[in-house]
Image (tube, grey):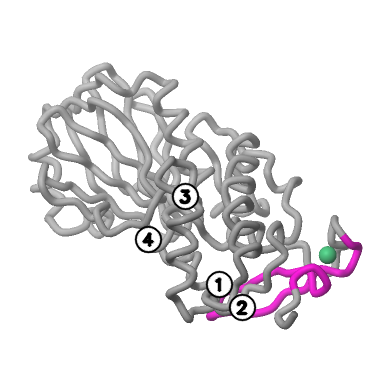
Amino acid sequence: MPELPEVQTIVNDLIEANLAGSTIRAVRVNWPRSVAGMSPAAFSRRLKGAVVRSISRRAKYIVFSLGSGRTVLLHLRMSGRLRLVAAGAAPDRHEHVCIAFTDGRELRLHDTRKFARLYLCGPDESILAALGPEPLSPDFTLGRLSAMLRTRARMLKPLLLDQRVIAGLGNIYVDEALWEAGLHPCRRARTLSSDERKRLFDAIPRVLKRGLANMGTALGAGEANFLSVAGRRGTNRQQLRVFRRTGLPCPRCGAAVERIIVGQRSTHICPDCQRQHH
Ligand SMILES: [Zn+2]
């Protein structure tokens, strides 16, 4: 699933392609459930003629701000991918939504597993309001993270995956951040010392910035792989310290990386650098 660095890479590609300023000519929905909360017909009708003012990211959502004050949100979930092509380009059987622009381009949502969702929000309603702070923004402070950790009994891994707590992290970057901070994913948040909280506060932006600098993490060779709009695979996989490196040496101490299950999620740790009990 694309996380903050991957979604931001896609947004950067769309901005670079000068999609902002484009006018929507028509919307075609081939898989009705790709659109949440309204019929594909209503979605298409409301978008026709709308101008895309800007494209940005919030958490793992791609945010298309329209001239009308409305916003289109896209969550790519497991396998959603965007292609920006010339009208008339050969369609793919996994293309579920096509947004055609008056300039002759089409933005197509390709999704083998069909979990990706588009949402059309009015000016005053937004599903973004419930999300936690952006970890690469000035809103994310040591004080705010510490206050959140001190009051929670939950284990670190599920807590950091919770988008209401911190926005944009997923399985890859939570595992990497916990390794970076030397914290076991099953530690209870409120048991962290102030030194451990500081280490986690430093680790989260560090792993995200590294992912972003490498234009995201592409895993495996399968169809559910991450690809940016410009077709870039991202090279961050080579920079991962523990994620999906089971049995390989920890880059810090050389111990073999282990895979465990935490909160039903596959989790990767160094058993020596990330001890549960100190
Ligand atoms: Zn280690």
Image quadrant of ligand 1 equals: bottom right
The picture places residue 3, in percent across and down from the top left corner, at 50, 51
The picture places residue 201, in percent across and down from the top left corner, at 57, 54
Taking the spot 14% from the left edge, 36% from the top edge, the residue there is 47
Instruction: Please tell me whether residue 108 is drawn above or below residue 271 in the rendered image.
Output: above
Extreme right residue here? Answer: 254
Secondary element at image label 3: loop
Q: Which of 232 and 102 is in front in this view?
A: 232
Label ID, residue 141: 3
Q: Which residue is under mark 2?
A: 187
The three-letter code of the residue at mark 2 reads Arg
Query: Which image quadrant is residue 90 in?
Result: top left
Q: Which residue is under mark 4?
A: 115
- Total label count? 4
The three-letter code of the residue at mark 1 reads Leu
Taking the spot 59% from the left edge, 56% from the top edge, the residue there is 173
Query: Which badge, 1 or 2, is on the more N-terminal residue?
Result: 1
